[in-house]
Amino acid sequence: MAITIDFSGQVALITGGTKGVGRGIAQRFADAGAQVVVCARTIPEGLPPEWAAYPADLREFDQAEALIDQIVARFGTLDILVNNAGGSPPSDTSNVSANFSQKIVAVNLFTAMWCSQVANRHMQKQINGGAIINIGSVSAVRPAPTVAAYGAAKAGLVNYTQTTGQEWLPKVRVNLVTVGMVRTELAHLHYGDEEGVRRTGSQIPIGRLADATEIGDVCVFLASPLAAYVSGASIEAHGGGDWPPFLDTPFRNTGR
């Protein structure tokens, strides 16, 4: 019998799901049959009409709580939460303001904590519980020059995942995806033109940047019954990670 993943009748909330990696994750849950709900501080035009979309600033606990309560009231359930909202512009770590760092930590750590806490409250009451997936970063597990606050926040998210991944069992599983470089509609801001994107991708062992939907594929797996025994874990979706700089390119079997 073929293995399939079908989320028909289930509701999946993807924070920051209107663009970038979040949009790719939302699309994959939609492809698997879920009722997709996305949120962002502002909702852009052009989202699929079957998706539900809510404006919210999840750095504020009251707004996170109101959002999730509203979703459960509307749909009767919340089965999957993907804490994707986050990001950071580069900054000079030695001179960055305290206000800037506080905002970066809030959007990359506190939003996930607030949403997870409220979602867990509902999921614990549901017969089938629920699944929470946190979107992490390779910046949590290696030096992160120019995005120190971001890396520190994502490192905190790793521990939060491990802790809640134990504490909230058996009803609610919590896992994390450690994400590397992803090609999105904003890739040019980080990597430059097409040649810059290609050159950056060539430095990754797999030879290219990820597509946002490939991060979505990992999330779909973690939310599915195929991962029923997985909680508190991290899956690396980084194309093999950073190529060690002491290895010269002639030793690489690039196949390109």
Image: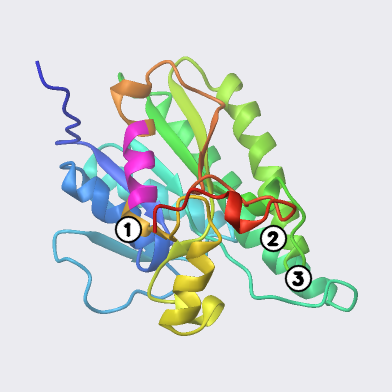
Q: Amino acid at mark 2?
A: Tyr
Q: Nearer the viewer, residue 72 or 101?
A: 101
Q: Residues within 10 Å of mark 2 (few under 14, many from 20)?
A: many
Residue 247 seen: yes
- Indicate the secondary structure of the residue bearing disc 3: loop
Q: Does 217 appear in magenta?
A: yes
Q: Amino acid at mark 1?
A: Gly
Q: Mark 1 to mark 2: distance in Å?
A: 21 Å
Q: Position of residue 207 (x, y in %)?
A: 45, 57
- The residue at which mark 3 appears reads as 146
Q: Nearer the viewer, residue 32 or 11?
A: 32
- Left or right of 149? Residue 67 is left
Disc on res. 150: 2
Residue drawn where x is 32% and y is 58% of the image:
24
Residue extending farthest to the bottom is 193
Q: Position of residue 51 (x, y in %)?
A: 21, 59
Residue drawn where x is 49% and y is 48% of the image:
253
Residue 114's place in the image compared with 60, above or below, is above
Residue 2's place in the image compared with 247, above or below, is above
Res 184 → quadrant: bottom left
Provide the residue span drawn in magenta: 214-221
- The residue at which mark 1 appears reads as 24
- Indicate the secondary structure of the residue bearing disc 2: helix
Q: Amino acid at mark 3?
A: Thr
- Which image quadrant: the N terminus? top left
Res 219 → quadrant: top left
Please name the predominant secondary structure of the magenta segment in the image: helix
